[in-house]
Image: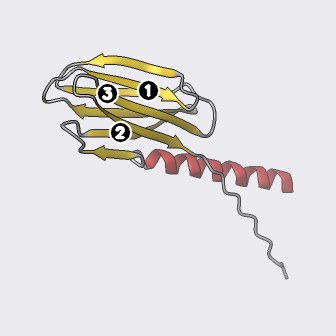
Amino acid sequence: MKSATINNLVKILFFTAVMALLTVGTVLTANANEGNNPVAIKYIGAVGNQPVFQVEFDNAAEAELLVVLKDADGHVLYNEKFQGKHFSKRFQLNRSEEDLQVSLSLINRKARQSQEYQINRNTRVVEDVTVTRVR
């Protein structure tokens, strides 16, 4: 009986933690006004255990930019040359680890400018156990 109660408590805490992450969809927001490229990175949520975030920026000068997404080990997950006025793309990372660390780089080779953003996800589960004396 006690085991079932503790399992239910853990399930409720886990569900609450997941709902808190989903309701705060824009917890991770990075805005940088370096150069002419204001960048917005927003955490959308997760599909299964795979985080989804959206990257948007304006490129008014329509300069050729290189967009690179790398994991913590330096492996390239995404690489694209972009030359339009507005970039908007959603990324779903196929990562099952609870903690996540990726970097996003925007590189303008012609102007020799680059911007780098670090994206981290840390998951914590809190378990509260109380003991009360019953009369």
Q: Amino acid at mark 1?
A: Leu
Label for residue 107?
3
Whether residue 42 is visible, yes or no, is yes
Q: CA distance from mark 1 to mark 3?
A: 11 Å
For disc 1, the marked residue is 69
User: Residue at image x 33%, y 29%?
Assistant: 106
Task: Specify few, some or many for label 2: CA neighbours under 10 Å numbering under 14, 14-19, or 20 or more.
Answer: many
For disc 2, the marked residue is 41
Residue 106 relative to residue 83: left or right: right
Position above or below: 104 against 24 = above
Q: Position of residue 133 (x, y in %)?
A: 83, 79
Q: Amino acid at mark 2?
A: Ile
- Discs 1/3, front: 3
Q: Position of residue 80 (x, y in %)?
A: 35, 17
User: Which element type, helix, strand or loop, lies under badge 1?
Assistant: strand
Residue 24 relative to residue 12: left or right: left
Whether residue 1 is visible, yes or no, is no
